[in-house]
Image: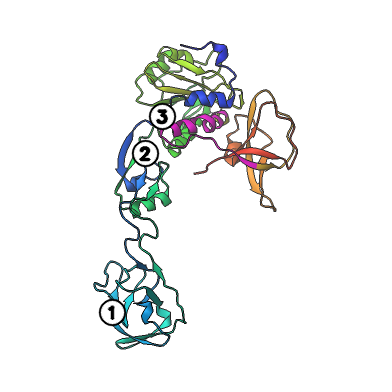
Amino acid sequence: MTEPARLLKNLTVEEARGRILQGAQRLGVERIALADAIGRTLAAPIVASRAQPPFDASAMDGWAIRRADYAPGKAFAVAGESAAGKAYPQAIQADQAIRIFTGAPVPAGADLVILQEEAVREGDTVRFEAGDNPRANIRAAGGDFQAGDLLLEAGVVDPWRLTLAASAGLAEVPVARRPRVAILATGDELVPPGGAPRPDQIFESGSFALAALIQAWGGEAFRLTAAADDAAAIAATVAPADADLIVTIGGASVGDHDLVKPALKTLGLDLTVETVAVRPGKPTWFGTLADGRRVLGLPGNPASALVCAELFLRPLLAALSGGDREVRLVPAVLAHPLPAGGPREHWMRAALSVDLQGRTVATPFPDQDSSLVGVFARADALLRRRLETPATGAGEVVEVLPLRRV
C-alpha cells in the first residue's frame, strides 16, 4: 500500500538509503572465464583443491643436499639437476648434491639448499662454504595454502584475488550477474555532446558520468532517449527497457516541466522515497514500477546527481550484485572553519591532502553550487555535514567519503 506523501518527504540520508536497499538482493549467478572476472563479484567462496606449492620447492638457485652430510669445505658428488617443471626423479643419496633452481622441487631426502654463490664446482664434485648452520632456503609444501583451505570469500575480484584464484587452478569462477541499468536524461534544454546547441540549451553531461560510474560499480549501463520531452514519450521509452534498474536524471522536482514521475505513474510507479533532506540532491526519489523494476530519480544538476549517486546508487548496485552495500566514511582534519549546518545534511565537495603530521586534511571548495561540474572534477572526497551540526573549527575532525577515482 502506498504510504502517505508526508511520510515519503524530507527523509534523512540513512532513512532514504534504507528504503532504497529494502529487498535488494543479488540478482543471479553465472560462471565466467577467470580472465574476465576483474571487477566482478564472486558469488561463492573459492576453496583450494590442492596445496600450493604442491611440493617442497627451492627458494634460491643453488644445490640441494642432506643437512646431515654438510660440513664447510666438504666435497659432494654432483648427481643431477632439478629445474622448474622438471624434477630430479630419485631420492638423494649420502654425500650427493643436486643442482637446483628457484621454484624447482626439492629431491626426496634433501632438506637444505646451499646458495650457488656459496658453492665451488670442480668437475663432478662441488664444495660449499656456507658457514656452520646455513639457512634451509626451502619453501615447504603447502606454505601458501593447503588443500581444503578457504582462499576467497564472496567479494569483488581484483588483480591480487585473481592471482590467488589462478594459483588454485580455476579456469572459471561463479560471479553475480551484473545489474542492467537504463539511464534516462530528460529536458528540452539538453543537447548531446557534439551537437549544435541553441543559445538557450546546454550540453548533457550527467548520463555520461553515471554510465561510467555504473560500469565501475559493477553494473551494465545503457542510455535511453525519449522521442520528446513529454510524459507520453517518457513512458513509452521506459516501458520496454530491459533493465533491473532505471535511473532518471532531471524531471525530479515539482515544476510544471518535471514530467518523469507523472509519466512513470502510468507504469504503476509506487514511491517509497519522494524527497531527501540532503544538500545537494533534495529532489532525489525512488520507487518501483508495477513489473518490479526499480527506479532511482536523480536531480538534473550534475553535482546533485553525482553526490546522490555516491550515497544511493553505489550501495544499491552493490546490493544487487551481492557485494558490500555499506557507505564507509573516514576521519579527516578540517582545513578551515565551517559555519553551523542547516536543516539538510550537506555533502560538500572537498580536496584531500596530508599534512606534516601525516593526518588527512579535508579542504572544502568555497563554491558548492550544485551545477558546478568543474568543482567535482577537482574533488577527492565528499565532506559530510550532519543536520543542524554546530560550527566546526579548523583542525577539528570531520567525516569524509573518499571518491574512488578510476
Q: Within 10 angstroms of label 3, few (less than 14), some, or many (20 or more) residues?
A: some
The residue indicated by pointer 2 is 43
| Disc 1 packing (10 Å; few <14; some 14–19; many ≥20) | some
Residue 25, which numbered label?
A: 3
Disc on the earlier residue, 2 or 3: 3
Residue type, mark 2 in image:
Ala
Q: Which residue is mark 1?
A: 93
Is 221 drawn above or below residue 113 in the view shown?
above
Left or right of residue 58, residue 3 in this image: right
Pointer 3 or 1: first along the chain: 3
**225 and 343: which one is in front?**
343
Q: Is residue 54 above or below residue 45?
A: below
Q: Where is residue 39? Give x, y as percent.
A: 41, 43
**Residue type highlighted by circle 1:** Gln
Give the residue at x 39% y 22%.
293
SS of the residue at dot 2? loop
At horizontal 32% and vertical 64% (from top left) the residue drawn is 55
